[in-house]
Amino acid sequence: MRGARGGAVARAVRGGLSRRRVQTIVIGLVLLASTGACVLALGLVVDSNAPFDSAFAAQNGAHAVVTVDAGKATRAELAATAHVAGVTQAAGPFGEVTITPGVPGPPGYTGRVAAPPMTLAGRASPGGPVDRLILQQGRWAQRPGEIVLSSSYQHGLSLGAQITAGGAPGTPRLTVVGVADSIDQSADGWVTPGQIAALRAPGTPATAQLLYRFADAGTAAAVRAGIAAVSAALPAGAVTSTQSYLQVRAQVSSGIAPIVPFVVAFACLGLVMSVLIVINVITGAVVAGYRRIGILKSIGFTPGQVVAAYTGQVLAPAVAGCLGGVLLGNVLAVPVLGRTATVYGVGTLRVPVWVDVAVPVAMGALVGISALLPSLRAGRLNAVQAIATGRAPRTGRGYAAHRALGKLPLPRPVTIGLAAPFARPGRTAVTLTAIVLGAAAVTFAAGLSASLTRVAGGLSRAQADPIQVGLPGGGAITRAGKPQPSAAAQQRAVEAVLRAQPGTLHYTVETTVQARVTGIPQQVPVTAFRGNAAWIGYAMISGHWYRAPGQVDVPTGFLTVTGKAVGDTITLTAGHTQIPVRIVGEVFDTSNRGLEMFTSWQTLARSGLPLIPATYDVGLRPGTDPAAYARALSTLGPGYSVSINTNEAFFVTLIGLIGMLVLLLAIVAGLGVLNTVVLHTRERVHDLGIFKAIGMTPRQTIAMVVCWVAGTGLLAGVIAVPAGVALHRYVLPVMARAAGTGLPASYLTVYHPAELVLLALAGTVIATAGALLPASWAARARTATALRAE
């Protein structure tokens, strides 16, 4: 008997699934999109919160990178440090050398340009007990003349590019064969161990790199104690430099921290929307089946069988949707987390396993509860009550709205559609909330993308200062045994070429010196500009750009560390001269964690230091192509560097992530609308038949069905615009504070009135898109079929 009952329930489940295919597909798709959005959002929140720690554990990173003078310690002494008390693992020694690389210039530039100094380590393979490298592209170096670059030191170099090692005998060439990540940022590149000696400049002492993990490394003091123990085991003076993983983590965390607030905002929107729509879909599916529940009870189904049958009809597509959503969320997370990991050099990021388990379990529990409660209520009803409850909404509900809207000068199908939501106020409220959240996400994303575009332009200064020309170094570098021209001759040569270019709008020269500043323990870079530099592109948060000698501009980080404010006076020490300066402006800049100063050439000239121009900043006339302009500067010859300022990859990652999350949320909201319209259509299928019988055309049917949710969508859009704007004005400053900077007012004021009007229509667009499919189905339904369907 029990088996017969179970078979009857199974047949009821299969029959319900086949009979209500649209409902089954909707449930599966809603759970697919909702679970995928939750997996993606929660995975991003977790990985954005501590990407370094996750990657550090995965790659078994080194707590300390120690560089030693290989001439002051034997290999046996270096190997013995692996057994020092407190050291749990060690790797190395790896030969180390620093080169001055020459890299290909911009397209059309025939010479080579100098890149920043590069530290290379000799490693036979990317693996090992400590600091396991992640090969992102290409392969590992296998022979002399090959190099694997760190992803944090690519400078536009791709596989196959050649680098010259300046200073090494014969200026050897290295071909890029791979790109790898080191969680410790232990080197800028890696070559075969036998290549190190050939890259070392004559007279330079041999150095080696050792990597250590300590039993206790949770604090800076513990890491220092571990390094001190290693240093004590080596001859005096053998250790030349050290690096703690905590320094790298602080740098990485300060960079990725801004991503967390907006991901959390999207995650909250997605979670709330998913919960509402899942409850609405599941409850509506069970309520829509009340009439069939009455029929099942009339043929002998017990309350328990009814509950099992309808819970099973809901859980079957829900489980499939949850499992598919886990796969979807992971697939969508791969490119986003991959770009984030590459930007910050934190190795490989992936959605944590516990997220893949917790999200579908939570969604499954939500679905089960949502299906069980109305199923239990239906199971307690007798057959007559269930059949009566399963019909269209209660008599009289929404009639007042029909009468009021019927007086408007609108086509009757439109007024019938606009009045329909009042028949199911609870379902309409849930649908309205879901559309509000989806439209608010669109508004928020539009503003955030516009603001981040301005932020990216402000940090890179790519619009105002697209071209930078670096000077060889004022006679310090030789070429073919001949000294470079003097600094003055170099400047005359550069300025002559710049004046000859028709695309040159203006230019200024800059140099940077290190200075001591009251209240900051380390030296601070002070950049001085010669001539008018107000055009150079630094956005002002408060105050103004310097206008006279003795005035300086500083970023937010500087003000935070020193406790100063715009208008205060501070003393900087350059060389042996103290120079009092007045802070006249707070600029938007995050370089060196905001610890820098900008001033005029005359201000630094008071120090008596020889100020050697280092870089020309060039502004271009409107319509000038920066790449073509850079190619035209090839007449400068070897030694000069020409670079084009572009927006950082980080912002490309953020804007792409925003678009992906908004798309997911819009799809979830649209599926919620689709479900609502499907339920309305099934409940009013008899009414549709009557409308068709008295002459309603397919176009009028589509208009009526779309209007069922169009009014709700319009109202949702009107509510969503101020909500999205408010969210934008809250989240963006939080992101800025996480990055340790303030924001110029113009970065927040990004919405235009016409844009806000269009964004207010986002709710209508989402509602219409979700309603089109069931509207088309209703328009195609035959009159007789609709009349029999009741």
Image (tube, rainbow, N blue to C red):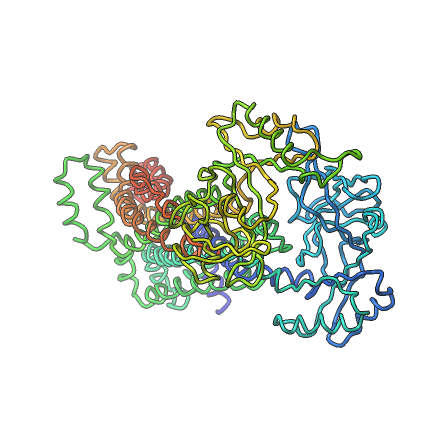
Task: Decide which of 106, 445 is in the foreground and name it.
Answer: 106
- Residue at horizontal 40 percent and vertical 68 percent from the top: 304
| Location of residue 266 (image quadrant) | bottom left
Task: Decide which of 333, 608 is in the foreground and name it.
Answer: 608
| Location of residue 469 (image quadrant) | top right
Q: Which x, y percent locates residue 106?
A: 64, 32
Instruction: State left or right for residue 401 relative to residue 195.
Output: left
Instruction: State left or right for residue 581 relative to residue 283.
Output: right
Q: Is residue 283 above or below residue 103?
A: below
Looking at the image, which residue sits at the far bottom? 85
Q: Which x, y percent locates residue 533?
A: 47, 39
**Residue 127 in sight:** yes
Instruction: State left or right for residue 285 relative to residue 9.
Output: left
| Location of residue 70 (image quadrant) | bottom right
Q: How many marks?
A: 0
Q: Which x, y percent locates residue 158?
A: 68, 39
- Residue at horizontal 61 percent and vertical 25 percent from the top: 632
Q: Which x, y percent locates residue 280?
A: 35, 56
Task: Decide which of 445, 268 is in the foreground and name it.
Answer: 445
**Residue 12 in sight:** no
- Residue at horizontal 83 percent and vertical 52 percent from the top: 193
Task: Decide which of 790, 590 is in the foreground and name it.
Answer: 590
